Amino acid sequence: MKKELRLMKGNEAFAEAAIRVGVDGYFGYPITPQSEVMEYLTAEKPHERTGMVVLQAESEVAAINMLYGGASCGKKVMTSSSSPGVSLMQEGISYMAGAELPCVLLNVVRGGPGLGTIQPAQSDYFQSTKGGGHGDYRLIVIAPSSVQEMYDFVELGFKLAFKYRTPIMVQSDGAIGQMMEKVEIDEQQKRFSEAEIIKNYPWATTGKTPDRERNIITSLDLDPARHEKHNIELQKKYRKIEEKEIQYEKVQCDDAEYLFVAYGTSARLCLKSIQLCREKGIKVGLLRPITLWPFPKDIIYDMADQVKGILSVEMSAGQMVEDILLSVKGKVPVEHFGRMGGIIPSPIEIADMLEEKFIKG
Amino acid sequence: MTEEIIIAGFGGQGVLSMGKILAYSGIMQDQEVSWMPSYGPEMRGGTANVTVILSDDRISSPILTQYDTAIILNQQSMDKFEDMVKPGGLLLYDPNGITQPPTRKDINIWKIEANKEAAKMGMRKIFNMIVLGGYLKAKPIVEFDNIILGLKKSLPPRYHHMIPDNEKAVKRGLEIIEEVQKI
């Protein structure tokens, strides 16, 4: 059967997907450029469609702690925000990682630091992939580069979140949040019943029964020996994620002599830059990390044998480029090009930069 | 086929909704589409613009600095976007409020008195649909019927009673647009 097609903003697609995959609760606080997520959810009245709760919390700090509560009970919960709001949530995110609670978070990144600007940026890469909050934890970070992926990554996010009992960050930006593209809409899925949650998630605090011990959800353990053991288990989980969950896309890499590495909006810009370069006879391809953590380091290491230079393109001062340098291990020159503060580079600028850094020099 | 379009004017002229209807028309004929608005402080009063792309293939960058077509509805946008039309491309403008008409010699230029016509028809709000009709004449990239389907899709049902007036406006635009320069 042909799926329903709609023209939607990235933020709206994310919100519609939340209803369709049977999310139990959304808790958030408005901030540009992602306010359409909650606006759409409020207008759609999902409590009438599926029973989903949508609540505007009094702050981002409150919202993330509502996620902690909902996730503890085995519910599918999510929030969305933009850079300054996500900074406020970091304490709660660290607690959820520590307590091994699944949830989906969306960051529609805007220019920073501080309140910064409302225009698109990719300067929260370090925050999402290297910690953000305190302690030895990782988030699985997935980066959509189209409105369809804003839709699809809600389901992917919950699949991974519950598989590994860990928070997932969907790392988008103001451009993908605000632009409209064609979206294929899936069938409505049912929310889990209480009985299904008890059956599927035996760790959840669903009420003690005589046949089992109490389920305790906490990130606190004052016994260092026990707490080190917990940390070792967390690290084992992260190694397993690195082994199994890396996702990336290769575009025109087969004959490439140079390589762009870019995600999200930058990856879209690079697709145009590839056309411009190839019109001039410069063979360039794109490697687009879909998971920013775990980072696709092996494929980049392999590509380094084939190409003469790698240009990392990010709307930041150069964050992902550090992971590329670690992956390449000095095999080929790696350069960074980016604009900051909400400026989106043009595809022409990117193509010129590749020439300037690797060919003319 | 790929058509990369910038539509630019004042907030309130229906720039964004014209782009949306065009994008929906593309979906109606099985094309890939993107619609990227200016959403910065400028949209809170002042200029508004939207980049619309229709393509038979996967769309690369939704953000551009060179366009196949520029639809220009005020002087500020003329100043900014005239130079960004690709050589051989199309510039379409409403002379109302334009003090310096385009001077490029390497592009096709069309003009449409949409503002005047909307006033004459007594329906200022359908101004943007007259412009859209004009664009269809200058570059028939979407079918007229798909425009009407796109209109139905992009308007909430409570506004569907306005579709006949909008349809009339598109038709009027097809009639009144004038070719200024052909290369």
Image: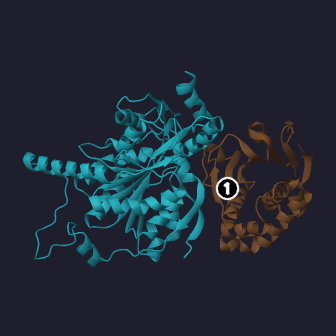
Say what amino acid the circle numbered 1 marks: Ser
User: Which quadrant of the view contains residue B176?
Assistant: bottom right
Q: Assess disc 1: are there few (<14), some (14-19) or many (≥20) residues with their C-alpha within 10 Å of its C-alpha.
A: some
Residue B36: horizontal and vertical position, in percent? 63, 51
x, y percent for residue A334: 44, 30
Q: Is residue B21 depicted above or below B86 in this figure?
A: below
Does residue A36 appear anywhere in the picture?
no
Q: Which chain is brown?
A: B
For the N terminus of chain A, give its image quadrant.
bottom right
Query: Does B136 appear above or below A334?
Result: below
Which image quarter holds the C terminus of chain A? top right
Q: Residue placed at 30% from the left, 44% from the top?
A: A133
Which chain does the numbered disc 1 sit on? B
The image quadrant that residue A84 belongs to is top left
Nearer to me, A63 or A10? A10
Left or right of residue B71: residue B118: right
Residue found 42% across the figure and 29% down from its top: A332
What residue does disc 1 label?
Answer: B55
> What residue do we see at 27% from left, 58% from top?
A164
Could you say whether the residue bearing mark 1 is in a helix, strand or loop? strand
Query: Does A294 sit left or right of A145 as displayed?
Result: left
Q: Residue at x 27, y 73 (%)?
A: A197
Q: Which chain is cyan?
A: A
Q: How is the image coloured?
A: by chain
Q: Is residue A278 above or below residue B140?
A: above
